[in-house]
Amino acid sequence: MKFWTDKNKIALMIIFGIFTIGYFTTIIKASYAFVPSQNANGLYDLTIEMIKTASSEYAEDHESEFSDEDTLIIKVQDLIDSKLIIPNNDGKLKNPLNSEKDLNSKIITIKKNNDGFDVKIDK
């Protein structure tokens, strides 16, 4: 009987080993769906779109400030001061790509055209 008991233990260890390898392989493959750099890039793109939308609203509210060339240059901080963008508790709009930096000093160029406004944000 001892022979069968040892075989059962060995078989259970082999099954457990195969299960463990399969489990960790599945977890590792699934974890690549949550790669931070991809999520950060998407969040950065959304933040830039939010800044562009807020800039268009700012331009509509401040049409009298446009120069003869129909160009207005502002910073993200101006949008924060106008309450068009809500910053964090420190008054900063954090950069999703680098949490140590903020976007407050980004320069925004707004050009007036017949259809509305063209917004460009410096890189």
Image (cartoon, rainbow, N blue to C red):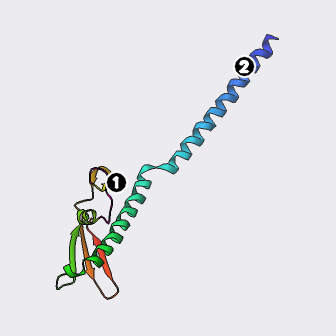
Check if residue 88 falls in the magenta segment: yes
Check if residue 36 falls in the magenta segment: no
Can you give x and y, in whole percent of width and height, for residue 95 in the image?
31, 55
Mark whose residue sits in front, 2 or 1:
1
Label tally: 2
Give the magenta-colored segment's residue range: 83-91
Q: Quadrant of residue 51?
A: bottom left
What's under tag 2, amino acid-wise? Lys
- Residue in the picture at 66% in, 33% down: 19
- Residue in the picture at 34% in, 54% down: 97
Which residue, given by chain and number where applicable, does mark 1 sit on? 97
Can you give x and y, in whole percent of width and height, for residue 79 in the image?
27, 66
Q: Quadrant of the C terminus?
A: bottom left
- Give the residue at the far top of this rendering: 2
Secondary structure beneath label 1: loop
- Give the residue at the far right of this rendering: 1
Which residue is at the front of the view, 38 or 5?
38
Q: CA gap, disc 2 to disc 1?
A: 51 Å
Which residue is at the front of the view, 111 or 35?
111
Q: Quadrant of the N terminus?
A: top right
Which residue is at the front of the view, 8 or 23?
23
Which residue, given by chain and number where applicable, does mark 2 sit on? 9
Can you give x and y, in whole percent of width and height, for residue 55 in the image?
30, 71
- Residue in the picture at 37% in, 62% down: 47
- Residue in the picture at 31% in, 80% down: 117
Q: Quadrant of residue 46?
A: bottom left
